[in-house]
Amino acid sequence: MLSKILRLFVKEKKIESSNIVQNGNLTTKELPQILDKTGIGIIVLDANDCIAQINSVSSMDLNIPKDYEGSKLVEVFNNGEIINLIKSAKVDTSAEEEIFGVDPGNKSFLVNATYDYESLETTLVFIDITRIKKLENIRKDFIANLSHELRTPVAVIRANSESLVDGALDDKEIAQKFSNAILKNSEKLSYLLEDILNLSTIESGEYNLELAENSISEIFKTSINSVLSNNPDIKIINNIYSDIKVICDTKALLQVVDNLIENSVKYGITEESKEIIINMQDQGSRVRFEIEDHGQGIPADQRERVFERFFRIQNNNTSLKEGTGLGLSIVKNLVNLMGGSVGNEKAYPDGTIFWFTLNKKN
Ligand code: ADP
């Protein structure tokens, strides 16, 4: 029975066939050890549902000390779903169930129970699916967020075009208003699509990153000049004091710097403060860059969250500004790909410092 299960895992490519003992005659002693190596948990219950064998992975993952061999499973791991699963296996020979939130670590498992009518043993196999479930949830959230973000501009474009077709075209003033709404929302859609394509290219590993030692001062100057040309009334103090070289991809670094400076203009410029400060610290093996504004700032509990896809702070400072909530997610991915890290902290007295680091040499 146990070798049958093992072969099933080989077939489903859950374990390497090279892990099987050559002559194929696996003993119940060998199997738990092999499964330990593959991270698969196994518990064998005798005819009285007492633990006859348990491997290290299940004892660790389910918090069952190894010396519980001989105890009834329900006494050491009282999980209703597992008990029902064992009952089903005794009726149908085998049964499978996903169980969630198992301590320690709130893990998720795919559990397979097989009952052997000859030996009256039940074999439980636990496969950790925590990571797969997490990724599945991220994907579901992404699709939900995306459709939510797409719905509004698409609805506005449709409603305004319908009104134009239905006669609003004849009134020049109204036609102008509706056409402007269509233009604005189609721009919003194209920014959204551009950011999504960008993010998926980066996350799928298809971003063509050319990492090399590059000077950084020109990149900052290019970004600053482009921001200043669109916002002539703001002041950017550039304290990049030397043309130090860092390991980066120039295109990706420009995108990071553009994004952070544009954000500090968008969210950090107020009537009282129209100043942005760019600082640099040589920290030996790496360089830290800071973009500091004195705007409304970011609440402490949302400092990490702003890097999540589609996350935008729920306040007037954000809701009055156009945005997709994807910019900082792109920034974080790009900085990480270049070997650095990124974060933000409170500026004094108010505002935010976004920082990122890059290595000087490989
Ligand atoms: P977007 O700007 O398109 O909304 P981002 O991912 O660039 O998306 O930013 C996420 C959110 O983080 C913004 O919506 C804003 O709420 C907040 N944020 C970003 N930069 C700043 C800043 N310098 N000061 C205050 N809030 C900021």
Image (spheres, helix red, strand yellow):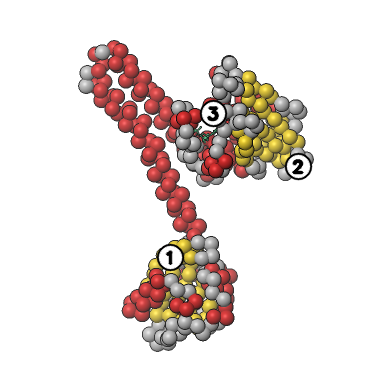
Q: Helix, strand, or loop for circle 3? A: helix
Q: Is residue 7 visible?
A: no
The residue most toward the top is 172
Between marks 2 and 1, how big is the CA–CA gap? 46 Å
Q: Which residue is mark 2?
A: 285
The amino acid beneath tag 3 is Tyr
Residue 245: assigned label: none
Q: Is mark 1 within 8 Å of ligand 1?
A: no
Mark 1: few, some, or many residues within 10 Å (few <14, many ≥20)?
some
3 or 2: tag closer to the N-terminus:
3
Mark 3: few, some, or many residues within 10 Å (few <14, many ≥20)?
many
x, y (%) of residue 176? 33, 15
Q: Which residue is mark 3?
A: 267
- Say if 192 sits above or below 111 in the image: above
Report the residue at 54% width, 68% height from top: 61
Q: Is residue 126 left or right of residue 355?
A: left
Between marks 3 and 1, how big is the CA–CA gap? 44 Å
Residue 99: assigned label: 1
